[in-house]
Amino acid sequence: MDVGRRLRGYVALTRAGNAVTAAVLTFVGAYVTGEAATARPAVAAAIAATVLGVAGGNAINDYFDREIDAINAPDRPIPSGAVSARGALAFSVVCFAGAVALSLTLPALAIAIALVNLLALVTYTKLFKGLPGAGNALVAVLGGSTFLFGAAAVGTPGPTVVVLFVLGALSTLSREIVKDVEDVAGDRAEGLQTLPIAIGERPALHIAVVSLLVGIVASPAPFVLGALGPTYLAVLAPAVGVFLWAGYRSYEDPTTGQTLLKVGMLLATLAFVVGRAVPTV
């Protein structure tokens, strides 16, 4: 097999965009605590552990999902033949080992978060993905916990980071449900009981939108608590608009809806960064 094609296959296994996004969220969690500048080695270790953990989780998910991907995503590395199933499994083990080694250099709370998350990543596809709503909830907690992990690497997660976790988890929950609606055909063929298959696509989308609205309602909390100033709200406003538009669009076009949800979360994350950078008045 062409070496270049194989290398590209391994890179595709990591879903590099997701891994880099998770790394950015880990940094944001550390930055929002106000301790990132004085704990750079710990921040670097947490970011690298996040990248490796997400890469390993994505690779093992592709390993377990290879039959479903043959229907839903035939261009993925395993069904396309770029990477063997055994190679993907070995790659995930190497990534997980690196993530654990880096995490062990961090404080106890960060180690605990890392170990729980790695266990969840390994067991997700086999134990939770096919259970209506359970897999979505697990991925949501994993997504939000990147903020907690970054904060725990340099200090104690405060109320602002907790709100970040809640907003990240709820927006991820919405996106995961919308994605399940998009993947109904392949999941049904594989016999999975995802939420939209179990209760119907439209009721599942209702749950996704309600989850999103709860996150929007919770998002001003750092300002109300006095942790972040008016600048935070000013930058947050566009994110709220994107979230609302994403919820509306998801009913007509789930693919566009989940893309907009990613954009909304990135804008909301930016609001926390800018709010932390600009002193409260």
Image (tube, helix red, strand yellow):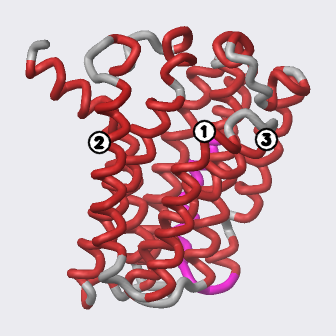
Relative vertical location of residue 164 with respect to residue 152 in this rendering, above or below:
above
Camera-near label (1 vs 3) is: 1
Counting residues from the start of the chain, the first of labels 2 and 3 encountered is: 2
Q: Nearer the viewer, residue 90 or 49?
A: 90
Check disc 1 and report the residue beneath it. Answer: 125
Q: Secondary structure at mark 2?
A: helix
Residue positioned 55% across, 75% down in the render: 161
Q: Kindly report the distance in space between the C-alpha atoms of the residues bearing marks 2 and 3.
A: 29 Å
Residue 133, numbered circle: 3
Counting residues from the start of the chain, the first of labels 1 and 2 encountered is: 2
Task: Judge whether residue 238 is colored magenta.
Answer: yes
Residue type, label 2: Phe
Camera-near label (2 vs 3) is: 2
Look at the numbered discs 1 and 2 and tell me whether their residues touch, using CB distance below 8 Å. no
Q: Kindly report the distance in space between the C-alpha atoms of the residues bearing marks 1 and 2.
A: 17 Å
User: How many numbered tags mark residues here?
Assistant: 3
Q: Position of residue 48 (x, y in %)?
A: 27, 63
Disc 1 residue crowd, few under 14, some 14–19, many 20+, Cα 10 Å: some
Q: Position of residue 207 (x, y in %)?
A: 84, 39
